[in-house]
Image (tube, rainbow, N blue to C red):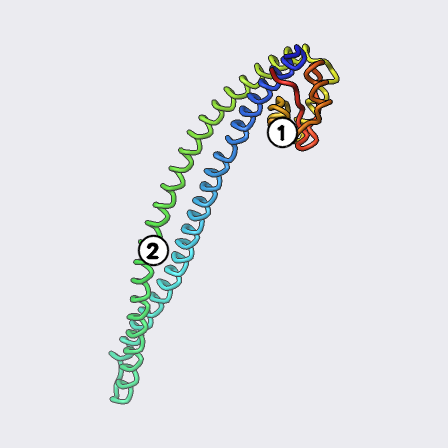
C-alpha cells in the first residue's frame, strides 16, 4: 500500500472514532430533554391541582357566607314566629321559617360536597407535589451523570483530535483536502479499497486503465458511482 494512502487511512480511523464519540455526545441531550419535559408536565399538573383547590376554597367561602345569612334569616323568622298574635301571621311566619331552613339544608349539602371534593383535590395536590419532587431528584441525578459523561467524552475527543491532527501531517495536502471534502458530505467512511475491479462501497466497476494507474502509482480516484475516494488494495 502506498504510504500516502496508509497515512490517510490512519486519519480516517481517527475520524471514524471521533464520529462515534460525537454521536454519543449528541445523544446525551435528548435524554435530559425527555426528563425536562416530564418535569414541565408534572409542574403543570401540580399547578392545575392547586388552582382547582383555590377555586373550590373560594366557592366554600362563598357558600359559608350564604349559609351564615340563611341562619341569621332563620333566627329572625323564628323570632317573628314567636311574636305572632294571629293564625294568619303564624302561617306566614312558619312558611318563611320553612323556606329559610330549606335554604340552609341546600347550602349545607353543597358545603358538604365541597368539603369532600376539597379532600380529594388536596390529596391530588400532595400526590402531584410528590411526583414533581421525584422527577426533580431524578433530573438532578441524571444531569450529574450526563455532565460526567460529557466531560469524559469531550476529553476523549480532545485527545483524538490532537492525535488526528498529528497523523494528518503525513498526508499530502491535496489528498487531505480531497478527503475532507468528500467526508464533509455527511460520510463517515470516505476512503474505500478497490475490490477486484469494483468500488468496495457501491460495486461500480472502474475502467481497466484507471485501475492499472492506481495500482502502479498508488494514486487515489473518486468513484463515479458513489463519490468515495478509492485506492488500490493489496
Q: Kindly identify the residue that appears in the image at 53 percent across and 27 percent down.
A: 25
Label 2 neighbour load within 10 Å: few <14, some 14-19, many 20+: some
Residue 127 placement (x, y as % from top left): 34, 45
- Identity of the residue furthest to the right in this view: 174
- Tell me the residue that label 1 is attached to: 187
Pick the front one: 189 or 154 = 189
98 up-or-down from 6: above or below: below
62 to the left or right of 100? right
Q: Quadrant of the C terminus?
A: top right
157 to the left or right of 135? right
Residue 78 placement (x, y as % from top left): 27, 75
Pick the front one: 60 or 190 = 190
- Residue 118 is labelled as 2
N-terminal of the two: label 1 or label 2?
2
Q: Secondary structure at mark 1?
A: loop
Task: Report how far apart the C-alphas of labels 1 and 2 lie in the structure.
Answer: 61 Å
Amino acid at each position: 500500500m502506498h504510504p500516502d494512502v496508509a497515512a490517510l487511512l490512519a486519519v480516517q480511523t481517527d475520524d471514524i472514532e471521533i464520529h462515534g464519540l460525537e454521536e454519543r455526545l449528541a445523544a446525551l441531550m435528548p435524554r435530559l430533554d425527555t426528563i425536562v419535559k416530564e418535569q414541565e408536565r408534572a409542574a403543570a399538573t401540580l399547578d392545575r391541582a392547586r388552582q382547582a383547590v383555590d377555586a373550590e376554597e373560594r366557592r366554600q367561602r362563598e357558600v359559608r357566607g350564604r349559609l351564615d345569612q340563611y341562619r341569621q334569616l332563620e333566627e329572625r323568622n323564628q323570632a317573628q314566629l314567636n311574636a305572632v298574635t294571629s293564625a294568619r301571621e303564624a302561617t306566614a311566619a312558619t312558611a318563611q321559617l320553612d323556606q329559610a331552613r330549606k335554604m340552609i339544608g341546600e347550602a349545607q349539602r353543597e358545603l358538604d360536597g365541597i368539603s369532600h371534593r376539597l379532600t380529594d383535590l388536596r390529596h391530588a395536590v400532595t400526590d402531584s407535589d410528590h411526583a414533581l419532587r421525584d422527577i426533580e431528584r431524578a433530573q438532578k441525578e441524571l444531569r450529574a451523570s450526563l455532565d460526567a459523561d460529557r466531560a469524559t467524552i469531550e476529553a476523549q475527543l480532545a485527545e483524538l483530535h490532537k492525535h488526528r491532527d498529528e497523523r494528518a501531517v503525513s498526508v499530502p495536502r491535496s489528498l487531505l483536502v480531497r478527503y475532507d471534502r468528500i467526508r464533509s458530505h455527511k460520510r463517515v467512511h470516505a476512503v474505500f479499497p478497490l475490490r477486484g475491479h469494483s468500488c468496495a462501497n457501491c460495486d461500480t466497476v472502474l475502467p481497466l486503465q484507471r485501475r492499472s494507474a492506481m495500482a502502479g502509482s498508488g494514486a487515489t480516484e473518486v468513484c463515479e458511482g458513489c463519490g468515495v475516494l478509492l485506492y488500490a488494495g493489496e
